[in-house]
């Protein structure tokens, strides 16, 4: 049984771990991170953990989230989202294996610093074009926090729903008991 524990400097809401650079500034090599992650996953009963503090303090004294909607331009993806298993911050841990992009984003937002969670969600919305479904959904559902995840493939709407009636309003016809 192999257990791997690795550190990363930044993770986006898809679950990509960037551990080698800070934008275009190179910090280190891979150090075998991906091989240990894959080795743990392939091992019977093995687990892989990617650990990071939820925030960091920049040289100018500002505090920034390490869990971000999109990686900083120029960042190198060390461990792709398809290989990331457990992610750990001081606010908990989640297992991303087998989760959809929307489920990953929701789980990772929960690991961000509480003061950064709404900023991360807002940044996702700011990355979309005004007047899209996101804007309409945000206006209609307010505190239910619908937001748009902008992926390189296609956009997906993620909604944190509090109860079954909210789900029925959000997706009539989709949610039917059989």
Image (cartoon, grey):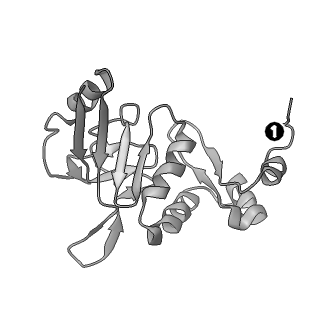
Front residue of this view, candidates 14 and 91: 91
Q: Quadrant of residue 153?
A: top right
Q: Is residue 84 left or right of residue 139?
A: left
Q: Callout 1 environment at 10 Å: few (<14), some (14 to 19), or many (20+)? A: few
Image quarter (top left, top right, bottom left or bottom right) of the C terminus: top right
Please tell me in which quadrant of the rendered image residue 80 appears. top left
Residue 13 screen position, x and y as percent: 46, 49
Residue 94 lies, in percent from the top left, at 43, 46
Residue 151 or residue 54, whichever sits in front = 54
Q: Is residue 54 above or below residue 46?
A: below
Asked if one can make out residue 142 in the rendered structure from this viewpoint, the answer is yes
Farthest-out residue, bottom: 61
**Residue visible at 55% across and 65% down in the picture:** 122
Question: At 56% from the left edge and 49% from the top edge, which residue is drawn?
Answer: 149
Residue at image point 30% right, 28% down: 46
- The mark total stands at 1
**Circle 1 SS class:** loop
- Is residue 96 or residue 62 the one in the foreground? 96
Residue 67 on image: x %, y %: 39, 56
Residue 129 spot, x, y in % from top left? 62, 56
The residue wearing badge 1 is: 175
Judge whether 36 appears above or below 117 on screen: above
Work out whether residue 71 can be spotted.
no
Which residue is painted at 40% across and 31% down in the image? Answer: 82
Query: In the visual, does 72 lie left or right of 39?
Result: right
- Quarter of the picture containing the N terminus is top left
């Amino acid at each position: 049984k192999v257990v791997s524990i690795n550190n990363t400097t930044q993770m986006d809401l898809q679950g990509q771990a960037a551990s080698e650079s800070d934008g275009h500034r190179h910090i280190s090599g891979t150090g075998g991170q991906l091989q240990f992650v894959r080795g743990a996953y392939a091992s019977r009963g093995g687990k892989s953990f990617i650990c990071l503090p939820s925030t960091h303090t920049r040289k100018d004294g500002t505090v920034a989230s390490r869990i971000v909607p999109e990686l900083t331009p120029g960042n190198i993806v060390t461990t792709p989202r398809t290989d990331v298993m457990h992610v750990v911050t001081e606010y908990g841990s989640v297992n991303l294996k087998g989760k959809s992009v929307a489920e990953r984003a929701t789980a990772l937002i929960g690991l961000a610093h509480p003061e950064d969670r709404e900023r991360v969600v807002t940044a996702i919305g700011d990355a979309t074009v005004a007047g899209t479904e996101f804007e309409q959904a945000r206006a209609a559902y307010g505190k239910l926090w619908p937001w748009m995840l902008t992926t390189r493939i296609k956009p997906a709407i993620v909604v944190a729903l509090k109860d079954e009636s909210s789900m029925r309003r959000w997706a009539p016809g989709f949610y039917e008991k059989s």
